[in-house]
Amino acid sequence: MRYFEYFVGPQHVGVTGNMSYHLWADGDEIKKMITSVGYLHRGFEKLMEYREWVKNVPMVPRICVPEPDVNEVLYAMGVEELSGLVPSERAQYIRVLVLEMARLSAFLFYFAGAAGALGLYTIPQWTIGDRDYILDRFEELTGGRAYHIYTTPGGVRRDLPDGFKSRVQETMNYLKKRLIDYDRLMFENAIIVKRTKGIGIIEKDYAMNMGVTGPNLRASGIKADVRKDDHYLVYDKLDFDVPVVGDGDIFSRIMQRRLEFDESIKIIEQVLEMMPDGGFIEKLPNPIEWKVPAGDVYVKLESSKGEFGYYIVSNGEEKPYRIHVRGPSYTHGIQVAQEKIVGMRIADVAPFLFSLDVCPPDIER
């Protein structure tokens, strides 16, 4: 039988826009899909082997543009563990603040994509506009909006500016009020519910067997979060919940992130209140001549898209011997997407792909 062929992507901007999805359909039913990557900046792992340790700090944020700080913190954590560096408690609190702000920023991008894929174009206007308020805080703190290059081995590049904590709190207060509008227009919208309930289901056992992580895993009913299960930085000192929606469909994945949005605001408010005084960076060796002790290490953390990990190998020289990035997007955006999309309707393709929250450069790293 001959099937009709569709090509989704690559085009920008969009989560699926940096990738190409080649689909075959029988009438309105998807029979097969192949994911094609390679349209974006790529090859970061190999490039890092040719640069001194400190010169990789500006490169790693590009592995996931909507949430760049995840890669900055992971790279710093790995180098620190190999080098025996221990960041100050203040630096660790600042890193948590940055990670959770980046998480909120990524979720706002996600809501925009999920709503836009369903034809609700007011939400992208709102959430991307509101995301700019978070980017204002990042620009104030780091000098950059998209890429921050702020976290470095030993701590962070600079301390919090005067009055920064109060301005972050103002942003959190604003977002909490805006969530009421988001709920009314999107999350409680009967059309959105009808278009996403019972579609694109990722069953609990399937998710576990395939290595699904993060909000996608929790939306399938598994309560797993690296921040709780394998403490890093100062997350063990913070009080927050790990919500689990559990139905595994598109609606569950959207609602999972809506619930986690509240928890990230809660974390940020605690960090602002609990942050201690002290230094923000440890003294480092000459960055050009810095030889990280030989050894290997694996570090991981919880991103908005799932579990991110770095495996770093040093042979005692000025450059890494090997770096491998374990991101969630390969599993979600290729393996799961290609299998679970079979049998769906053409109209469900965009909502399903956006619901997985794929970061294409994470695949092409």
Image: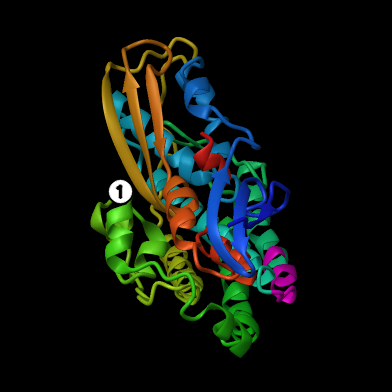
The residue sitting at the front extreme is: 1
Q: Three-letter amino acid code at disc 1?
A: Tyr
Q: Quadrant of residue 43?
A: top right
Colouring rule applied to residues: rainbow
Callout 1 crowding tier (Cα within 10 Å): few <14, some 14–19, many ≥20: some
The image quadrant where one finds the N terminus is bottom right
* Residue at horizontal 32 percent and vertical 56 percent from the top: 227
Question: Which region is colored magenta?
Answer: 119-128
- Residue 359 image point, x, y percent: 55, 49
190 relative to 31, above or below? below
- Secondary structure of the residue carrying tag 1 is loop
* Count of marks, rendered view: 1
* Residue at horizontal 46 percent and vertical 14 percent from the top: 286
349 relative to 177, above or below? above
Residue 90 visible in the picture:
yes
- Residue 337 image point, x, y percent: 48, 56
Would residue 288 be counted in the magenta stretch? no
Q: Main secondary structure of the magenta part?
A: helix
- Residue 348 image point, x, y percent: 59, 70
Is residue 97 shown left or right of residue 350? Answer: left
Residue nearer the viewer, 291 or 9: 9
* Residue at horizontal 51 percent and vertical 41 percent from the top: 362
Residue nearer the viewer, 78 or 325: 325
Q: Quadrant of residue 350?
A: bottom right
Residue nearer the viewer, 256 or 161: 256
Residue 224 visible in the picture:
no
The residue sitting at the bottom extreme is: 190
- Residue 50 image point, x, y percent: 50, 14
- Residue located beneath label 1 in the image: 232
80 relative to 200, above or below? above
